[in-house]
Image: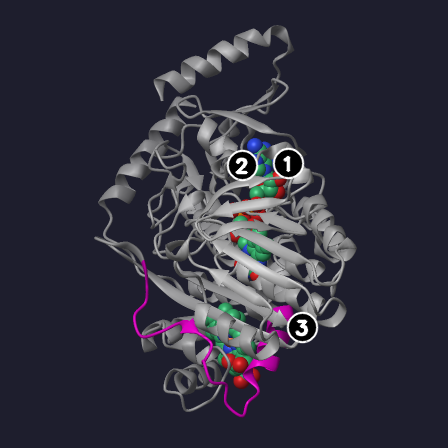
Amino acid sequence: MRTTRRRFLKSAAASGAAVSLLGAPAIAQGVAGKVVVVGGGFGGATAAKYLKLANAKLDVTLIERDDRYITCPFSNYVLGGFRKIEENVQTFDALTKLGVKVTKGEAAGIDAPGRLLRLSGGSRITYDKLVVSPGVELNYKGVPGYDESLAEKLPHAWKAGPQTTLLRSQLEAMPDGGTFIMVAPPNPFRCPPGPYERVSTIAWYFKNHKPKSKILILDAKDAFSKQSLFQGAWESEYPGMITWIAGKDGGKVESVDAASMTVKSGFGAEKGTVINVIPPQTAGRIAIDGGLTDDRGWCAVDPQTFASRKAEHVYVIGDASIAGAMPKSGTAANVQGKVAAAAIVAALDGKAATAPALLNICYSLVTPDYGISTTDVYQVTADRGIIATPNAGGVSPRAPTAMGERKLEAEYTRAWYQAITADTWG
Amino acid sequence: MILYRAALAAALVLVGAAPTMAQTGQAMAQTCYVCHGPGVKGAGQIVGLVGLPKDHLVRQMADFKADKRPGTIMNRIAKGYTDEQLALIAEYLAALKK
Ligand SMILES: Cc1cc2nc3c(=O)[nH]c(=O)nc-3n(C[C@H](O)[C@H](O)[C@H](O)COP(=O)(O)OP(=O)(O)OC[C@H]3O[C@@H](n4cnc5c(N)ncnc54)[C@H](O)[C@@H]3O)c2cc1C
């Protein structure tokens, strides 16, 4: 913490007279408290909204580097050719209307003892409480032979936007009979079912437009989310098209070579027509630079409130946090945003926080009419932190009944998107 | 500012000392919004719950929990709550305005 402050002061001094101080301490302005939120994604936007809903007198500022937000959820459907990327765009208009001060900027450093957030460009903003929801940082170098510039040739598409449309255009340009290779990441990573949903929707596109094509998944892991449901669906919907190589069977990738479009692993040297590299991940850069991460790059938090274990008055939610049994999902980030908002409102009121309510749902589409899900309700335990409540939750039934669950769950997948985006940005 | 900091510090001490409190109906009910929409007003094919009386909500959740009512997902979710928690959730939801 000392070093952070010293480093902060040094860089503040370096930018000299240009430094401006955005906002004065809240108490001087006669408001209930001043909360700054970093990141306008699923976690940050929800936290900002629910802070304002709980207490309209709170001074809430949302710092986001982009003008708008493009959701990763439903970006796999863009890759499958049954959704347009424009439909994934969320704006901050409703938050602004609610009184959140949406501010475009890049958070660059945290001075926790001084309760100051530093923005790139030199300005600083004071806070009583800080919420950090920056999502993930991709560790390009974690895959030998790969780096950030190569993402233009071998897209990761693990942040939605230009990367998604680039991968889509490569799939469109691919001749029938080509091979799509996915390099799947090690745990923990954003959206555990995401790579396998992606393979499914790309298989949907191939089946309808390029049926001679093949898909190879080279995985660092030995198991994955909703595995038996996905594999069962691949057999029935896309027989013979998809091969998954587990880490223990040589799936862990040793290197990628962009020039020859080759991926080397214990499985052999495989040539791909289109290669999707999903690198290992850590908490977003600001969490690392702000001194909030552990030696593995993620943020330890108090599971009752999502308060950082590293810095007072700072809360970390969403993908960046270590949340026990909860996966890194948009739903989890939204729900954690509500927990942090309630804890902050209580703390600013001088009250004890009530127990957190935690739930997750991850829907995936295997085809536009074939949905599967995994859900859990959680509780916080003294010894094991956040655990899934026993004898509840779990995945869709392996053998669907006469209800037509797969078709219904595909409808509910689309309903979930409407609900959660309205709850987060609406 | 100093006074304010002192008040906050006192609050923190209180938080540390307080026994773990129960989940409120509001906190649990707000997690339902991710599927039933904000204020449980409904979203696409997932029905709204706003305007439904408490007793009805309690009965539906109990039926899902006991697998007396079939569903794609509510059975798995309802099993995650005690009957007391379901009553708190229903009470909060039943009081929401359309
Ligand atoms: C292909 C794919 C499919 C997915 N599908 C689903 C799904 O179906 N369901 C589901 O629940 N989840 C899904 N997810 C996961 C979901 O996208 C993430 O878990 C979720 O976005 C996490 O929210 P967050 O708030 O932690 O981070 P993000 O949503 O990534 O938000 C972080 C925000 O902070 C901003 N930011 C970061 N650093 C700074 C900084 N220093 N200064 C200013 N702004 C900054 C970023 O621009 C961004 O807007 C999917 C993910 C992928 C990749």
| Label pair 1/2, CB-CB below 8 angstroms | yes
| Residue A39 point in image, percent of width and height | 57, 40
Q: Which chain carries label 1?
A: A
What is the secondary structure assignment of the residue under circle 1?
A: helix
For badge 3, the amino acid type reads: Pro
Residue closest to the eye, A23 or A254:
A254
Host chain of mark 3: A
Residue A391 included in the magenta stretch of the image: yes
- Is the residue A206 above or below the residue A29 in the image? below
One can see residue A422 in this view: yes
Q: Is residue A357 above or below residue A128?
A: below
Placement of the N terminus of chain A among the 4 image quadrants: top left
Measure how far apart labels 3 and 2 are at the Cα level. Answer: 32 Å
Q: Please, what is the three-letter code of the amino acid marked with disc 1?
A: Leu
State left or right for residue B21 relative to residue A326: left
Decide whether residue A301 is among the magenta residues: no
Of mark 3 and mark 1, the one earlier in the sequence is 1
In the picture, residue B61 is in which quadrant? bottom left
Q: What residue type is labelled 2?
A: Tyr
Quickly name the residue at label 3. Answer: A368
Q: Mark 3 or mark 1, which is nearer to you?
A: 1
Q: What stretch is highlighted in magenta?
A: A387-415
Q: Name the residue under label 1.
A: A150
Query: Do the CB atoms of the residues marked 3 and 2 lie less than 8 Å apart?
Result: no
Q: Name the residue under label 2.
A: A140
* Percent x, y of residue A221: 41, 54
* Chain name for mark 2: A
Q: How crowded is mark 3: few (under 14 residues within 10 Å), some or many (20 or more)?
A: some
| Label 1 or label 2, whichever comes before in sequence order | 2
Query: How many other residues sit within 10 Å of disc 2, few (<14), some (14-19) or many (≥20)?
Result: many
Position of residue B36 relative to residue A352, above or below, is: below
